[in-house]
Image (cartoon, rainbow, N blue to C red):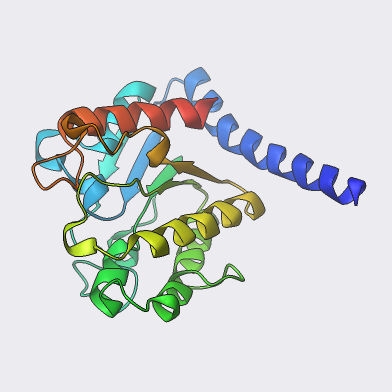
């Protein structure tokens, strides 16, 4: 038992080291890190002003960022424009920042009785549409940083989704511990749901201040 526990700790440490090595290599190289962001509206919000979460993360790291996240982005039964896998394109990316899944829960099961949809995204055995996509990105040579969801100031149309999103993030975190070149970073660790200034007018998406806080948190967590 002790040996297996030590091996799990060792493997997890190796995976974190591999992620951090990407950033260290970029810091030593003349070329800036290249980050692609693929996800839903949490990553897309403020995209038009350059104050979105991925851009804030990139600024903190001195990285080049391309953000193809889209409002309403989904992994299952989505139109081509909102299909996050379709929006991804292979390239010389050092890191792909990813999130998503909440829109699938709202669209496919109305945030109620969503166990089957959750399993389509990622099952308790860590299989499904999202792990398949993560593995496809990794096979292209990029490290993956998965951003977990935060509790929002308001629920809006996502009322009822919170328990499923908590379980979803728990599964994604477990996937990261078992997957080389993947790191799970929980944005909830950066956001106080009671601080209204961190949210946009809808109480769900981040304000510019909230996006900056999350972006700099992701940069710091990825390089620690």
Question: In the rendered image, which quarter is residue 45 located in?
Answer: top left
The residue most toward the front is 194
Instruction: Name the one closer to the observer, 105 or 147.
Output: 105
Q: Would you place residue 196 above or below residue 118 in this image?
A: above
The quadrant the C terminus occupies is top right
Can residue 210 be seen here? The reply is yes
Residue at image location 20% in from the left, 75% down from the top: 79
- Residue 71: where, in percent of width, then height? 18, 57
- Residue 136: where, in percent of width, then height? 49, 63
- Residue 132: where, in percent of width, then height? 50, 68
Instruction: Name the one closer to the observer, 63 or 124.
Output: 124
Residue at image location 62% in from the left, 54% down from the top: 179
> Horizontal placement of 42 versus 48: left or right?
right
Q: Would you place residue 116 above or below residue 133 in this image?
A: below
Q: Would you place residue 39 above or below residue 48 in this image?
A: below
Residue at image location 25% in from the left, 52% down from the top: 69
Residue at image location 38% in from the left, 36% down from the top: 34
Instruction: Name the one closer to the observer, 69 or 206.
Output: 206
């Amino acid at each position: 038992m002790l040996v297996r526990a030590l091996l799990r700790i060792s493997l997890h440490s190796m995976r974190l080291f591999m992620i951090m090595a990407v950033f260290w290599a970029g810091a030593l190289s003349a070329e800036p890190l290249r980050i692609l962001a693929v996800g839903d509206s949490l990553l897309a919000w403020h995209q038009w002003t350059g104050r979105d979460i991925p851009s804030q993360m990139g600024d903190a790291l001195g990285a080049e960022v391309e953000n193809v996240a889209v409002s309403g982005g989904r992994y299952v039964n989505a139109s081509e424009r909102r299909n996050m896998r379709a929006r991804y394109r292979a390239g010389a990316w050092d890191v792909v920042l990813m999130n998503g899944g909440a829109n699938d829960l709202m669209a496919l099961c109305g945030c109620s009785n969503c166990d089957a949809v959750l399993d389509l995204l990622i099952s308790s055995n860590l299989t499904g549409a999202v792990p398949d996509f993560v593995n496809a990105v990794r096979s292209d040579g990029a490290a993956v940083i998965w951003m977990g969801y935060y509790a929002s100031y308001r629920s809006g149309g996502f009322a009822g989704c919170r328990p499923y999103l908590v379980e979803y993030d728990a599964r994604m975190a477990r996937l990261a511990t078992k997957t080389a070149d993947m790191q799970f970073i929980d944005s909830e660790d950066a956001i106080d749901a009671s601080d209204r200034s961190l949210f946009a007018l809808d109480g769900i998406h981040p304000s510019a201040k909230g996006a900056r806080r999350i972006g700099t948190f992701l940069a710091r967590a990825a390089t620690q």
